[in-house]
Amino acid sequence: MIPSKKQMLWWGRSDPDYSRNSVVRQNLAAQGWEIRDFHPKISALGDITAALFRTPTPDVVWVPCFRQRDLAAARRWCYGKGIPLIFDPLISAYDKQVHERFKLKDTSRAARRLLNWEQKLFAKPDLVLADTTCHAEFFKNVLCVPEHKIRVVYVGADETLFSPAHCPAPRDTLDVLFYGSFIPLHGAQTIVDAARVYKGPPVQWSLLGDGPTKPACQTAAAGLTNVLFEDRIPYKHLPARVHSADILLGVFGTTQKAGRVIPNKVFQALAAGRPVITRLSDAYPQGAFSSESIAFVSPGDPHALAAKVAEWATHSDALAQRGHAAKILYDAEFSSSHIRRQLSDSLAALKTIPVSCRSY
């Protein structure tokens, strides 16, 4: 008799194709999990909706990234059925408003209310996932999540899309590519400033995508012939664009949050076998600092970024080897097999949390 698959209820109106969700779901499926989606129209009434529609009881409920608003209802439903609840937030609402968007001062009454609200929410899951060790520390120290309820699962990359390809043929002008949504965390302005002070072999600084800081970057780049802005492209076409670049750029923002992340674009570039330059961060495993595939520069420092690009461009014959090293680093630290181990360890940890420890 073939044993039935483990059942997981994916609770919340999330985008399954978003990179974090897609990678997690692929790797959970590879471990034998059958995922059913539950999208309540009103988040606060999700438990009532689940009861009315007699939603089948799963082995575990998963609330995906950005869905803080679904936690309370999911907790009530799980509590009544004795089902463990996992939350994969990816971001903190408090962190975003205070330390990234700077809409609230941490000493303000509004910020304290937001922090108190989120601390109460983060107490509800049986397990909270963090994408880096730095975010795990933030969840513990700021959002007051007990350490034993936190596990780290890297974002990784969709390996069905991002895989190594031949390096571009030698050319007179190298393509240095940034892509993203132009949020403050990315520090795209630093890239434009680096292009302005750049002194080295010819390179084209390509900035692909759209977002709130793009207009300011375009204004700052006025008159620069070595900067090209590209419109956003469909996600399925992104790997080909990555493969056509010689050097990939990560993030260079100076915000606290920028120092706690390993961005999607870094995972994707490494998986595609492309070398990356990004800002220094404690979020990376030690192996990244000894790899020739990734270079770290000070955040918000255009001169450091320009100098590193010039160094790599001067020795462009080494870029192929750096690309090879990128895939080696990815396989060693961030691959699907590594993420599956992290997921497996995280799910196994649920067995060690007594029911009495679960918050209602």
Image: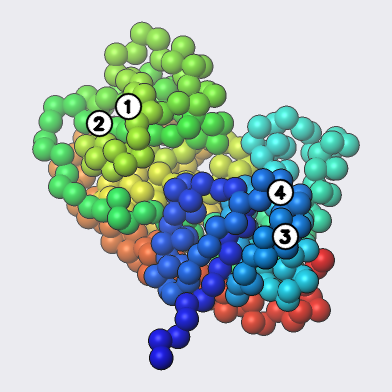
Q: Is label 3 in contact with label 2 (beta carbons under 8 Å)?
A: no
Query: Left or right of 257: which side holds 287?
Result: left
Residue type (three-letter) at the residue carrying disc 2: Asp
State which tag comes first along the sequence, 3 or 2: 3
Spatial CA distance of label 1 from label 3 is 52 Å
Where residue 257 appears, x then y in whole percent? Answer: 61, 43
Few, some or many residues within 10 Å of mark 1 (<14, 14–19, 20+): many
Q: Nearer the viewer, mark 1 or mark 3?
A: 3
Residue type (three-letter) at the residue carrying disc 1: Ser
Few, some or many residues within 10 Å of mark 3 (<14, 14–19, 20+): few
Spatial CA distance of label 3 from label 2 is 56 Å
Q: Which residue is mark 3?
A: 52
* Closer-to-camera residue (168/157): 157
Q: Secondary structure at mark 1?
A: strand
Residue type (three-letter) at the residue carrying disc 3: Leu
- Would you identify the image quadrant in which residue 200 lies? top left
